[in-house]
Amino acid sequence: MLHRPFRRLQLSNCTSTNSITEKIQYKKRDTGSITTSSSDAGQETLKNADSTEGETPNQRRRFIILALLGIVVFVLGFGVGIGGEKVHEKRQSQSSLATQQNSTDVDANTATDDDDDPSAQIPASSEPTSSSPATTTPPSSNVVDDPTTSPSPSQSPTRTPTSGPTRAPTSGPTSSPSAKPTTAAPTDKPTDATISYVPGNLVTLQDNLLLSEGLATRRIATSGQPVEYHDGTRSGRNFHFLPDGGAVFADTRGWNAGGWVYVSNSEMREAGQGGVGAITFDKNGRVLDYKMVLEGTTMNCNGGRTPWNTWVSCEEVEFTGKGWQVDPFGERQPEMTTLGSAGGRWEAFAFDARNKDKPRFFMSEDHNKGTTRRFTPSQTHWGGDEWRMLHEDGVVDYLMVNPNAENNGGTFEWTDDIEAARNNAREFYPQSEGIDVHGSKLYLVCKNIYQLFIFDLDDMTYVNMTTVSGLFDGKPDQMKRIVGGDGGLLYFTEEGGKDAGVHARDEQGRFFTILESPVYLSETTGLSFSPDGKHMYIAYQEDGMLYDVWREDGLPFDAQSLNVKYHNVGTRRLSHQWVTL
């Protein structure tokens, strides 16, 4: 340590002072002999003083000078020693303060790390502040952090030094991971471990719905109550009663890029109390807005979409029901269509626009003599005001079937004889409900006779088959087709039944159930899928519940699934167990 050399210097100085004192005492004795001496140097000095008196003043001056020098050295040595002690204490104090400062920095950095944690900064759902869709801004939660500049929440770098009182770690955290994540496709194909959807295996009970394995759901609207928006606000008006047919449209408005609108008919039977409601979703499937886009109509049952992104809503009122073309975004006033203007119990709408010169539009009628109609507009307006095609003149004809001896198929034709077509419908395909077109195939279900008809629009043949299978104990109603890699599935809703739900049929004719409810007994309606195929919307009409259903593995409904649990005729669910009657 620094103070020890100075202590040795002090001891040396004291010894020199004692020697000088002894020498002065010898001089005072004025003796010619010396009896004691503290050093050889002292004895020699005194002898010289006795033998030469002329040198006495010089000797005294030398003694005085040496004494003063000794005192000066002593004082300096003592001061330097004290100064060394002070320097040492000061350095110890500085070291202690540095240690305390580092400890304080660790605590502060720990708090800063918490602030840097994305889960602490970003709320569970970051929503727009305004409930008005026109002023909606992209939610901050939609921004994905760049993995090359943001530490992972599960393994963020610590700011605490590993050792020593230094202010910074010996190896500071880098701004990017040592191994940059790849964005290329995996070398191996996804395994079944990443797929959890098992259609038909009803094992999950959630919010009064019994779902196939790998599905989840949430209720997004209830009749008579405001619709909850994802920012915590509510709609200004209540969700409509008796939700029926529905469809989804990609949102073309710039402020909601990637979003969509779900339209839903209201089948209120009181005159003028029906209409069409529209729920706007953002690109993540979160609710932004709800409003009515058609009002003043009656018993709006089902309907269908057009090739130009509008909705046709069908009134199911005998003799007076009409079809209405509706803008799902509410920017254009609804208008009555030429097809259906004669009045009837209209049910559903579909189109075949493969031939742009002769587009075809179809409408079914829920009546014992309800013949399916086909409309061919006289003029087309592709690339212009396509809306007008449904409101100008055209040709309306009617479906007639010619069954084979087995009554499981045959041929068909279109006629302008409406009475002949009505009688044909009463005999072979009464109470037409859901209708859909995919490619050259027109699909039609008849609820009272539990039949599915598949018409080939090109070769003018058809087949029909029963829909009584598995859990499908209600009457088949609306339907939608989901085309996937395995040939596609035809989804049905169900008009009542003990466990009304959503069912599907593959191209091999095998049926299975997607979901059902052990609580609700009313018909399932409003079946539709989001543009990305990841959200299925379904309503229970009398109960007024609208649901969003999705796959827990995050894949669209038309993606690969695990083994499907098909339901054969005679198979029913009793006490949540599969049994064969």
Image (cartoon, rainbow, N blue to C red):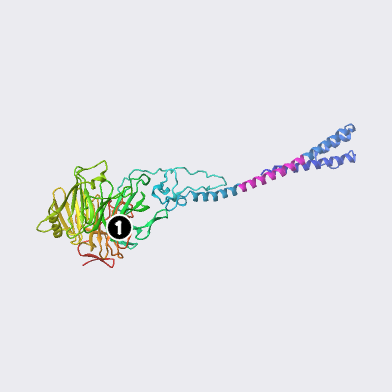
Q: Position of residue 406 (x, y in %)?
A: 10, 59
Q: Position of residue 67 (x, y in %)?
A: 82, 39
Amino acid beneath label 1 = Gly
* Residue to which mark 1 is pinned: 274
Q: Quadrant of the C terminus?
A: bottom left
Residue 82 belongs to the span the image colors magenta = yes
Q: Position of residue 401 (x, y in %)?
A: 13, 55
Q: Nearer the viewer, residue 236 or 49?
A: 236
Residue stretch in magenta:
73-97
In the image, farthest residue toward the top: 54
Q: Quadrant of residue 201?
A: bottom left
Q: Is residue 469 left or right of residue 292?
A: left
**Rendered view: 579 above or below 118:** below
Identify the secondary structure beneath mark 1: loop
Residue 276 belongs to the span the image colors magenta = no
Q: Position of residue 246 (x, y in %)?
A: 29, 54
**Rendered view: 579 above or below 445:** below
Question: Does residue 532 show up?
Answer: no
Count of numbered marks: 1
Q: Is residue 444 left or right of residue 264?
A: left
Residue at horizontal 13 percent and vertical 57 percent from the top: 424
